[in-house]
Image (cartoon, rainbow, N blue to C red):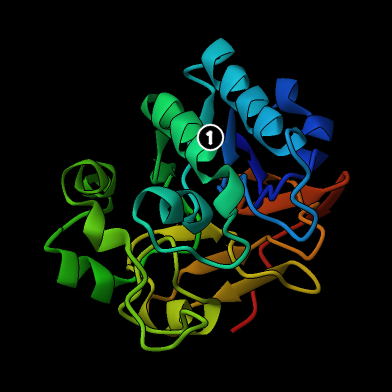
Amino acid sequence: MKICVIPDVHQSTHWKKANIDSADKVIFLGDYFDCWENKWPDQINNFLEIIQLKKRNPDKVDVLFGNHETSYFLNEQCSGFQFHHAIAIVKALMSASQYMQVAAVYDGWLFSHAGVSHKWMKCAGIQSVEEINELFIEKPDYFRWVGPDGFGNNENEGCLWIRIPALLKTAVKGYNQVVGHSELDELQFRISPYSKTKILCIDSHDHSNIIELNTETASFSTDGNIRRGAAQP
């Protein structure tokens, strides 16, 4: 399966350059709002365009939540929170929520905004990753920031907040993962020493690392340059 994965958006329009037609699936990893510029209404219009893409392609496109979405309706006010536009953002998110989810699984690959820790799953009382989306609907408080580390580098953090060092130590077994959330200088392909699975971290400072992942060969391409499973510990 060929999956086009789009990292944190944060108002950027890089996603419009993605070769969506050639992919079997398209997955947005979340964080559509909040950035240093916070242009308005460009930001909310960009989000609504993504939701329209989902509506036109309901079986092909997955639109995932990030922590910059849930912070508005869980009242967490993470960095860049827009007090002046909060009501409009909440209304847009509530209207679009039926088209969104927290996690997606295809061919043994798990997609979420920040990554899934087995310790968080135990705290949340779920046995499988297939239960994550239902848990979000029924008990959204499990997706709040846990702390005390303000950066989110806590092994008990949920799949919207955990950082890569903590995820590598606690990644759920049985699934390779693709995550955003942590802005990196370059794309990282890592191996979790705990789960022995691959962790592909694709967010960058300009949010332009759109990849096409081949789930069968564990290879991926960025801008047409193919990289195979040379994951690093």
Q: Quadrant of residue 15?
A: top right
Examine the rendered structure and indicate whether residue 232 appears above or below residue 95. Answer: below
Q: In the image, 193: left or right of 225?
A: left
Between residues 133 and 85, which one lies in front from this camera angle? Answer: 85
In what quadrant of the picture does the C terminus appear? bottom right
Q: Residue furthest left?
A: 125
Whether residue 217 appears in this view of the structure is yes
Q: In the image, 229: left or right of 169?
A: right
Q: Residue at x 88, y 46 (%)?
A: 223
Q: Which residue is mark 1?
A: 88
Between residues 210 and 113, which one lies in front from this camera angle? Answer: 113
Between residues 95 and 110, which one lies in front from this camera angle? Answer: 95
Whether residue 110 appears in this view of the structure is no
Q: Residue furthest front?
A: 84
Q: Residue at x 36, y 25 (%)?
A: 98
Q: Percent position (x, y) of residue 51?
A: 57, 24
Q: In the image, 217: left or right of 41?
A: left
Q: How many marks?
A: 1
Instruction: Tell me the crowding category of disc 1: few under 14, some 14 to 19, or many 20 or more residues within 10 angstroms, Cα based.
Output: few
Q: Residue at x 68, y 53 (%)?
A: 219
The type of residue carrying mark 1 is: Ala
Q: Percent position (x, y) of residue 141?
A: 23, 59
Q: Residue furthest bottom?
A: 148
Q: Percent position (x, y) of residue 104?
A: 41, 42
Q: Percent position (x, y) of residue 166?
A: 44, 83
Q: In the image, 29: left or right of 65?
A: right
In what quadrant of the picture does the N terminus appear? top right
Q: Residue at x 80, y 70 (%)?
A: 186
- Judging from the image, what secondary structure is the residue with disc 1 in? helix
